[in-house]
Image: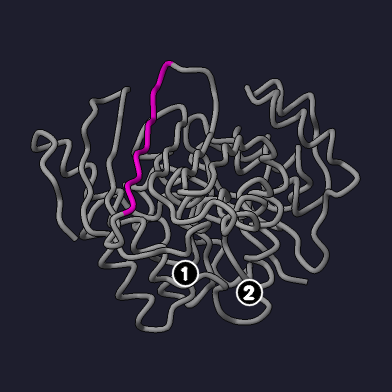
Amino acid sequence: MIKIGVIGMSPGNAHPYSWSAIINGQFDAEEISRVGYPAVAAYLNVNKDTLGIPGAYVTQVWTQDTAISESIAHTTGIPHIATNLVDMIGQVDAVLLARDDPERHREMAAPFIEAGIPIFVDKPLAYSTEDLEWFASQWHQGKFIMSCSSMRYSNEGRILKQELAALGKLELITAVGKKDWKKYGIHLLEGIFSIIDFPPVASVRHIGELEKEIVHIELESGLQITLHLFQDIAGTFQFSFFGQSGWRLVDIKNSYSMFRDNLIEFIRAVAEGKPRIAFSETELLMRIIIAANQSRLVGGVIIKF
């Protein structure tokens, strides 16, 4: 049995609840709704027949607030609440850093990485070049670091990838999502780049503004990609792929299945002793995220890769 520790929680991010429920196979829908995540309670309830991942169990939880830790533990059957973050070291076999505030990731992941404990870091891994270089250096020293958006495992994206050849030579990819670039740009990037197999990037440019963020990416092949993240639109994640022979619209709906597949892949990787994602892929997407932010800060200049 792989013993897992969960670290949370950041505002608006229900992953400590949902991921723990998916792994442990139990949840309290009323409590999850009470703390502000009725949609999570709904998809867990619909999929309760597939909850639980054999061979793994969340045994420890830590958050910055004991009341939140107690709520997560009670809701998902976690037996132990850690008083301090580092108390998990020696008690767990792997860690899920289930916070999506990247400016805190290095600080919170470091004790576990330095102790040689496999860690999955919620998206995005980093939001500064300095932090990304630190994670990369740890990876090259052989440390087990895995990070991605669960959009990599979306059923809808995989169906499109299966049909991709029928579109002919791709000319344009567009994507639309709600919320901000810093935390949610990775969803659009991971979804698209996992479909087109992480090709080299020529340039990145931020051509929008805060709360109406538009990022233009040009690949070395000449393929154009535009990503749109607007704070005040209805919740959505959509990809449109336009080729010379056809086009497809992908509307990502099934959050539960991609979360579950992501967790299965991490647990499988821990059992195998190495991540199942190439760090170079994660590093490329982080470089795009950081470059787009740098472009915005200096008036939308083109950042060459």
Image location of residue 15, percent across then percent down: 60, 42
Q: Is residue 75 left or right of residue 252?
A: right
Q: Secondary structure at mark 2?
A: helix
Tell which residue pokes out farthest to the front in this image: 245
Left-right relation of 55 to 157: right
Q: CA distance from mark 1 to mark 2?
A: 10 Å
Check the image and report above or below for 56 versus 154.
below
Q: Nearer the viewer, residue 196 or 257?
A: 196
Q: What residue do we see at 60% from left, 67% from top?
A: 94
Image quadrant in which the C terminus is located: bottom left
Q: Which amino acid, mark 1?
A: Ile
Nearest the eye: 83 or 44: 44
Q: Quadrant of residue 211?
A: top left
Q: Is residue 84 visible?
A: no
- Mark 2: amino acid: Val
For mark 1, what is the residue? 145
Residue 150 among magenta residues: no
Please give the range of residues in magenta. Answer: 223-232
Q: Which residue is mark 2?
A: 270
Please rate how many residues cluster around mark 1, counting C-alpha atoms within 10 Å: few if below 14, some from 14 to 19, many from 20.
many
In the image, residue 189 lies at what x, y percent? Answer: 42, 48
Residue at the spot 42% in from the left edge and 63% down from the top edge? 198
Whole-percent x and y of residue 242? 47, 43
- Whether residue 298 sits left or right of residue 153 in the image: it is left
Secondary structure under the numbered disc 1 in the rendered image: strand
Closer to the chain start, of discs 1 and 2, is 1
